[in-house]
Image: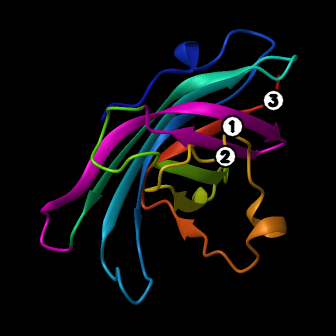
């Protein structure tokens, strides 16, 4: 994955999030897993969101557990925080109706942070709306971005 430039992120007047970052998971079933997330997304004043999200999940030995892309279906930006949802299109990937909901905190001079959940795998299309983890999933772990980073900007 390559990091998109600021000029590619969002047209003037739009809110956006862009960048590529790596986190190392610490949950008991995934200790030491390295996950790269890339995003290039924008939303206009009317609330229309567009963009692309990429993921690559590596096991501790470096082998690939999962990788692919999804379409951004929702983006909300408040200050240095971006909430977005990305849904893997039909026919892409091995899990039907797979979605990611993410919260990205642009740390400025400090490391960025991300929180995320995955949904899907069933016959129903996952929700395309944005999810605020602190409201709907309290206690969701935040991961410090160890390599790369993100830029979040309002419209």
Give how far apart the Cα atoms at labels 3 and 2 are. Answer: 24 Å
Q: As displayed, is residue 90 above or below residue 112? A: above
Q: Viewer-proximal residue, 7 or 135?
A: 135
Q: As displayed, is residue 109 above or below residue 42? A: below
Q: Is residue 113 magenta?
A: no
- Comparing labels 3 and 2, the label whose residue is closer to the camera: 2
Mark toward the start of the polypeptide (3 vs 2): 2
Locate residue 13 relative to residue 2 in the image: left or right: right
Residue 117 location (% of width, % of height): 56, 62
Residue 39 location (% of width, % of height): 50, 35
Q: Viewer-proximal residue, 105 or 33?
A: 33
Badge 3 marks a residue whose secondary structure is loop
Q: As displayed, is residue 126 above or below residue 89? A: below
Residue stretch rendered in magenta on the structure: 60-89
Residue that numbered label 1 is attached to: 152
Residue drawn at x 76%, y 76% as measured from the top left: 138
Mark toward the start of the polypeptide (1 vs 2): 2
- Identify the residue at the far bottom of this view: 28
| Quadrant of the frame with the C terminus | top right
Residue 48 location (% of width, % of height): 76, 20
Residue that numbered label 2 is attached to: 127
Q: Viewer-proximal residue, 102 or 114?
A: 102
Residue 129 location (% of width, % of height): 73, 42
Residue that numbered label 3 is attached to: 154
Q: Viewer-proximal residue, 136 or 30?
A: 136
- Comparing labels 1 and 2, the label whose residue is closer to the camera: 2
Badge 2 marks a residue whose secondary structure is loop
Locate residue 85 relative to residue 132 in the image: left or right: left
Q: As displayed, is residue 147 above or below residue 52? A: below
Which image quadrant for residue 41? top right
Q: Residues within 10 Å of mark 2 (few under 14, many from 20)?
A: some
């Amino acid at each position: 994955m390559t990091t998109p430039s600021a000029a590619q992120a969002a047209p003037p007047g739009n809110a956006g999030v862009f960048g590529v970052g790596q986190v190392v998971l610490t949950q008991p079933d995934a200790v030491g897993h390295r996950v790269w997330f890339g995003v290039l997304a924008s939303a206009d004043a009317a609330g229309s969101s567009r963009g692309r999200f990429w993921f690559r999940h590596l096991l501790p030995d470096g082998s690939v557990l999962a990788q692919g892309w999804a379409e951004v279906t929702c983006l909300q930006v408040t200050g240095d925080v971006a909430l977005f949802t990305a849904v893997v299109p039909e026919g892409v990937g091995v899990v039907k109706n797979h979605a990611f909901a993410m919260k990205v905190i642009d740390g400025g001079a400090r490391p960025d942070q991300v929180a995320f959940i995955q949904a899907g795998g069933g016959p129903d299309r996952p929700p395309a709306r944005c999810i605020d983890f602190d409201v709907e999933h309290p206690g969701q772990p935040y991961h410090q971005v160890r390599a790369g980073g993100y830029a979040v900007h309002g419209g």
